[in-house]
Each structure stands twice: as structure tokens, then as C-alpha cells.
Amino acid sequence: AQKVTQAQTEISVVEKEDVTLDCVYETRDTTYYLFWYKQPPSGELVFLIRRNSFDEQNEISGRYSWNFQKSTSSFNFTITASQVVDSAVYFCALSEVNAGNNRKLIWGLGTSLAVNP
Amino acid sequence: DVKVTQSSRYLVKRTGEKVFLECVQDMDHENMFWYRQDPGLGLRLIYFSYDVKMKEKGDIPEGYSVSREKKERFSLILESASTNQTSMYLCASRGPDATKNIQYFGAGTRLSVL
């Protein structure tokens, strides 16, 4: 069965601290995609990144970076020098590839990040 | 940019009422989804549609139905609202390359059933 686990329910940091959000997944597929979404207090989920299972290169986008490790089935998300605007709920998700139109996202339960001034 | 619009941000209804939640996307996407989000339970898929007049049950379809008469619009219907359907409802659409599976979300409708 496919599963995404975000063990950290809530994290609280002080502005400018670095913070890592953990995501561990389970799948029997050899080809799959992993995602991170951000849900700010306004409610709309915003797509951040998609990674396919064949690409284990780390990704950096400004203060955001992602570490994908197949050996540990993890896709962790780090925010460097956090800011108050980073306060949000962050979701990790997994997508199977070989399910045609019925392809769905398997969601983690989310990590609520509070960045305090 | 993809825009997914949900007709209401907040809605208050009474038990037993029929409730319509509307969602419109402007990118000609074939696939659309309805989720509900509850504390501690994350996002749960209610229904999805991969084409006009096509629908598939998600993980928690009980108590809900959907309608997709036009490509851009996907409606979620609560035939007889109950208090346990108080929740945040999120609509999403997905682009033509299903392999990439990037879903774009609306701002959500927070429904309270009294």
C-alpha cells in the first residue's frame, strides 16, 4: 500500500532559524512522483515542487531546498533563514504513475510550521 | 497561471438542507477533484472527474454526489447536510499531462452545518 508519513505535526521556530520538514513514503511502484504543497492561513494549497523517482538530485529554490533519498524513502524539505511568511501547513504527497486517469495523490497529514518574530 | 475558483469562502447551512459547492477552473483541464480537510485527518478525496459527465468515487464518497456538465465546472452536492459534514472543502484541477499529476487548488469553502 502507498503511504506518506509526516511525523512532525507542529513545528515552532524563531525567525531566521533553519527548519527541516520530514516526509517518508511507502510505495511498491518503481516509478512515482513526490510533491510538496504549502497551505498558508488563507487556505489555498500552493504547489511547491514535484520530483520523479528517477531524479535524486537535490533541488534548491531560493531559501527552499529538497533532499530526496530513495535509500531511506524520504523527501525532506528545508527552509533556510525562515521568515514569518513561511508560517503555513506543509503537505507532502505521492503519486503513482501507472494508473491512467485514476492517478491520485496520496497525502501526508501535514506539518504546521509557525515562524515567530 | 491556473485559476481555480470556489464560489464561497464561508457557508453556513442547516441540517437536512441540500448544499451545492461550486468550483470553476479556467485552464481547460480535464481532471477535477473534491477534497475535504479536517484537523488530524489531512486531505481526503471525495470524488474526482476526468472528463465531462464522468465521475469516480474517491475515498469518502458517502453522503456526497457530484456533477460535471461542463468541462470548467465541477459541483459537489450534499443531498441532506449533516453536522459531520462540517469541514473545509477544497477543489482542485489537474492539467492534461496526468503523469505529472500537479493539482491546482481553489481557496477552499469552509462549510458549517448547524
Image: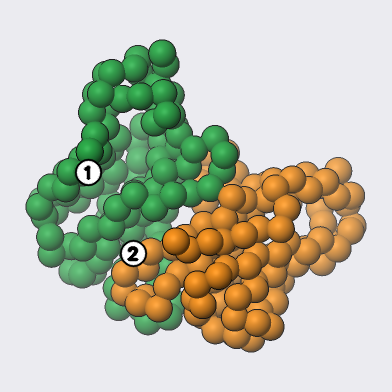
Chain colours: A green, B orange
Q: Is residue B98 above or below residue A60?
A: below
- The answer to whether residue B58 is left or right of residue A75 is right
Is residue B61 visible in the rendered image? The answer is no
Q: Residues within 10 Å of mark 2 (few under 14, many from 20)?
A: many
On-image quarter of the N terminus of chain A:
bottom left
Chain letter of disc 2 in the image? A
The residue labelled by disc 2 is A95
The residue labelled by disc 1 is A61
User: Which residue: 64% across, 86% down?
Assistant: B53
Q: Secondary structure at mark 1?
A: strand
Q: Residue furthest front?
A: B1
Q: Position of residue B15 (x, y in %)?
A: 88, 51
Q: Distance from label 1 to label 2 (Cα)?
A: 22 Å
Q: Are marks 1 and 2 in contact (CB under 8 Å)?
A: no
Q: Secondary structure at mark 2?
A: strand
Identified by mark 1, the residue type is: Ser
